[in-house]
Amino acid sequence: MPMQDVKKTDMKSETNVKRVRRRNRWLPLYIAVVLVLTAGVGVALSTTVFFNVENIVVTGEAEQYTVTDIVKAADVCSGDNLIKLNTDEVAKRVYDNLIYIETVDVQKKFPDELVINVQKCRESYNIVYDNGILLASATGKIISNSMEAAEGLPIFYGYLPSILSPGEKLKSQDEQKDKIFYLFAKIMSRELSSPITSVDMTDKYNMRVCFDDRIIFDLGNWNELEYKITLAENVIDRLGIDKSGYLTMVGNNQCSFRDSSVVGELDPIKPVETQATTTTTETGTTNANGANSGSTETTTTVVTTTVPEEEQQYQ
């Protein structure tokens, strides 16, 4: 009977192979666990031991406050962790607590520095209301509430502020008047050849703007406000600096000008105290009911008086 070949099996080698396979199967899990633990330790160290505030640097322009004032308002201390620090909240604290600060920018500089850049408020507008005058910055932050207007700044009438506290942002009782004011602020932020010195938005559908204390512009409602102001500015440039009088929108792309030498002395824009008003010209007065006083003829308002022979139209 022929003999069969006998296969020899190395039991030890086979066992080792199985162990290696089992080990390789669990290797990714081991690596993941190690990575998670390492990351956890790293995060714990970075929020407790490392990246803590050692230096607070204040830059910018705000002579009303010292560095100590600004750091105190920021409420950030040496040892606070940069990772945990919310820069938006720090900026808001500085803005809210310091009235004369217009903008705040807070940046982290690792490993241990916090930079706070501030810019001061620039007094820009007088906002007249029933019981006083708000002094506001270019972005609408209320700087003060007093009885006197800041000299040399534009005056807004009829805004109807609902917030009067210094440090707060301007807000009108009329949402549309908020939009009108901030649109005017945008227009006035650029250098106009004839600066706007006052705005009456008491009636938002029939607004008046005074340029350079010598030209009063009846612009109607606030539709296409930027275009209307640009048109008026171009007309005033053509008139020359020696002219004073009244501009009125005619249609959508024309202005009518009446010289004050013809229609009478220029009436400055001022607050409307009552609904029934009396308008005075050089030749007499007329009340709200149309009854004349004096022996001379008057007009209801100089703006709506028609003087065909002297009226000039521009577009």
Image (spheres, rainbow, N blue to C red):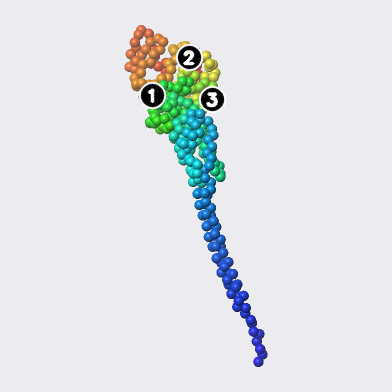
Q: Which amino acid, mark 1? A: Gly
| Disc 3 from disc 1: Cα separation | 28 Å
In this view, the residue farthest toward the bottom is 1
Instruction: Name the mark on residue 191.
Output: 3
| Disc 2 from disc 3: Cα separation | 25 Å
Nearest to the observer: residue 38 or residue 193 = 38
Q: Which amino acid, mark 3? A: Glu
Residue pointed to by mark 2: 259
The first of marks 1 and 2 along the sequence is: 1
Is 132 situated left or right of 21 in this image?
left
Q: Position of residue 166 (x, y in %)?
A: 42, 30
User: In the rendered view, would you say 83 is above or below 147?
Assistant: below
| Disc 1 from disc 2: Cα separation | 33 Å
Is 19 situated left or right of 311 in this image?
right
Mark 3 lies on a secondary structure that is loop
Say few, some or many: other residues with alpha carbon within 10 Å of mark 2 (under 14 / 14 to 19 / 20 or more). some
**Comparing labels 2 and 3, the label whose residue is closer to the camera:** 3
Residue 31 falls in image quadrant? bottom right
Residue pointed to by mark 1: 132
Picture residue at 54% right of the left edge, 32% below the top:
60
